[in-house]
Image (tube, rainbow, N blue to C red):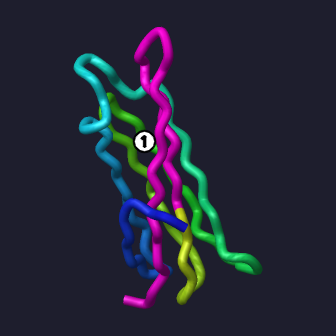
Amino acid sequence: MKFWSSFEQDPQARLEYPIEWSSRLNDGEILAASTWEVISPAGDTTPIVIDQEVIGDTGTAAWISGGTEGYDYYLTNHIETNSTPLSRKDDRTIRIQIRQQ
């Protein structure tokens, strides 16, 4: 799977993963909607959890916890902007590797 960035996280940690979208926005354009999606490995019984989602004018973030040590997860942020007459839609995927720190 193609991903934008990769991070390691301890299975006991709760960390924030921000994405700054300003380089993809036109002047005066802001984020209107943001959703996050987790793709877990097949057979995983303890996947990562999205504890909180955050959206601002030009950035988003997800607070992540859990996961199974040794597994890799993919966290995708889907956004939509306030531009008219058609809103801009885009997404970015982050790989999160659960490793004991």
The N terminus sits in image quarter: bottom right
Magenta span: predominant SS is: strand
Determine the image quadrant of residue 55: top left
Furthest residue in direction top, as rendered:
85
> What's under tag 1, amino acid-wise?
Val
User: What crowding class fits label 1: few (fewer than 14 Cα within 10 Å), some (14-19), or many (20 or more)?
Assistant: some
The C terminus sits in image quarter: bottom left
In the image, residue 60 above or below residue 13: above
Location of residue 91 in the rendering, given as x and y in whole percent from the top left corner: 48, 45
Q: Which residue is drawn at 25% across and 38% down?
A: 23
Q: With 90 as the anchor, is 24 left or right in this view?
A: left
Residue that mark 1 sits on = 54
Location of residue 37 in the rendering, given as x and y in whole percent from the top left corner: 60, 53
Residue situated in front as seen by the camera: 21 or 16: 21
Which range is magenta?
Answer: 75-101
Location of residue 74 in the rendering, given as x and y in whole percent from the top left corner: 54, 65
> Does residue 22 show up magenta in the picture?
no
